[in-house]
Image (tube, rainbow, N blue to C red):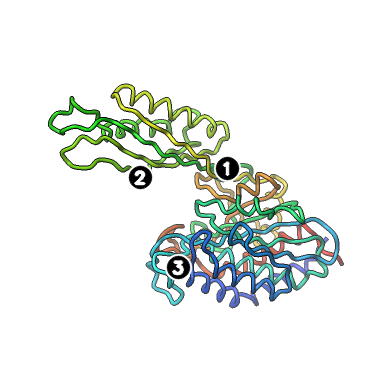
Amino acid sequence: MHRMEDLFDIEDRAAGMQNEMVRLRRDFHRHPELGFQENRTAAVIAAYLRGLGMEVHEGIGKTGVVGVLRGGAPGKTLMLRADMDALPIQERNDCTYRSVNPGVMHACGHDGHMAVLLGAAALMSEIRDRMKGRIKFVFQPAEEGSGGARHMIQDGVLKDPDVDAAFGMHLITALPCRTVGWGRGTIMAAMDSFTLRIKGRSGHSSMPEGGVDAIAASARIITALMSLNTVPGFSGRTLINIGTIKGGDASNVIAEKVELTGTVRNLITGNRAAMPAAMREVIDGVVREVGAACELDYQEGYPPVVNDDEMTDLLCRTASEMLGEGSLIELPPLMASEDMAFYLERVPGCYFFLGAGNPEKGLTSSLHSSLFDFDECILSTGAALFTRLAISFLGLDG
């Protein structure tokens, strides 16, 4: 069991590291890199972890970094994860640490995730001799759509030593500072993607009877697909979105080809499995009626994020002890997706949200906004919470 004085000391030490975490966060923010291109970012992280005396592995999952902290006594292995990649967004913030890379921005808080985890690594390195077991500090590339978690798993991030449990977190401005958003079971949706190609027959726009209009067919298909969002059993648990539509060559020509791309999000595994067939049924019904042809390419993406009950209880107890029961905000399942899901398919764990919004400072812009920013006071809170979670799971000697 840990002593309460240990935990209060951890929060004091985290507060003392605040300026260092702000420096790291702003450096990452100033130099954002897209998925699988996080070379500078990875080098900074690896050097920092080595400076803490950790065993460091680079190039895991292409550009990922893993630091291993071995405690002074045998025990379990805990994984703590932060994502590293930025987004292809031109930053509009006017701040001293704004992105210097045109068209690339940390608009999803990953710069903060890395700073928090590095701060936690520094805190835990101070007590390594008393800590049981091992901690893997995992800095993952390419969360934003490229599934960097899969690549790290393929490269053995969950092995040698085998991971017993995992925690990850996401900063979010929709919640106020020093609050924790949590959920039990499925908390985020699976996300798949699709490409639909419709082939009609071109002709002159003055003689529509001589052609098969692929654009008109696509309009009907879009309406039919959107109706699936409201089918009983799917409603509220399934979300189909059309993201792009490309077709036609001239304003006075009946379009021969149209290509649609989109995403399908599901909170229920059975719904996810049923969606390709349901989509094909409504698409085939339209193309048969109008005399067109189609090809549906459906690709499975991220699975749902499913929190383990025991690890969720551990999070709630630990956060409540540190921040007070009023800081815990139970969230409904979100239709957003996260590749933390790949880790949680294989090991028990918990993914949670750390409130970083501050309306008084104007820090309320949503994730993926070109104006996204967060209250940096949350950095020390996050580092202390990760450290408390590690102590609660692994235990301390003495």
Q: With respect to residue 215, does 359 lie above or below?
A: below
Q: Pointer 3: what residue?
A: 360
Residue placed furthest toward the left: 206
Residue 189 occupies quadrant: top right
Please state the horizontal and vertical placement of residue 199, each as a whole percent of the image.
31, 32
- Amino acid type indicated by mark 2: Thr
| Mark 2 burial class by Cα count in 10 Å: few <14, some 14-19, many 20+ | few
Q: Is residue 8 visible?
A: no
Horizontally, residue 134 falls left or right of residue 293, namely right
Question: Which residue is at the front of the view, 245 or 92?
Answer: 245
Residue 261 is labelled as: none
Report the front residue among 275 and 115: 275
Tell me the quarter of the picture where residue 67 sits: bottom right
Estimate the spatial distance between the alpha carbons at disc 3 and disc 2, rounded to whole Å. 37 Å
Q: Quadrant of the C terminus?
A: bottom right
Q: Mark 1 or mark 3, which is nearer to you?
A: 1
Which kind of residue does numbered mark 3 sit on?
Glu
8 in relation to 351, above or below: below
Which quadrant of the structure image shows residue 56? Answer: bottom right
Tell me if residue 78 can be seen. yes
Name the residue: 49% across, 65% down.
Answer: 33
Percent position (x, y) of residue 203?
A: 19, 32
Q: Tell me the tag on residue 244.
A: 2
| Circle nearer the viewer, 3 or 2 | 2
State the image coordinates of residue 97 (x, y, percent, origin top left).
46, 74
SS assignment at label 1: loop
Q: How crowded is mark 1: few (under 14 residues within 10 Å), some or many (20 or more)?
A: many
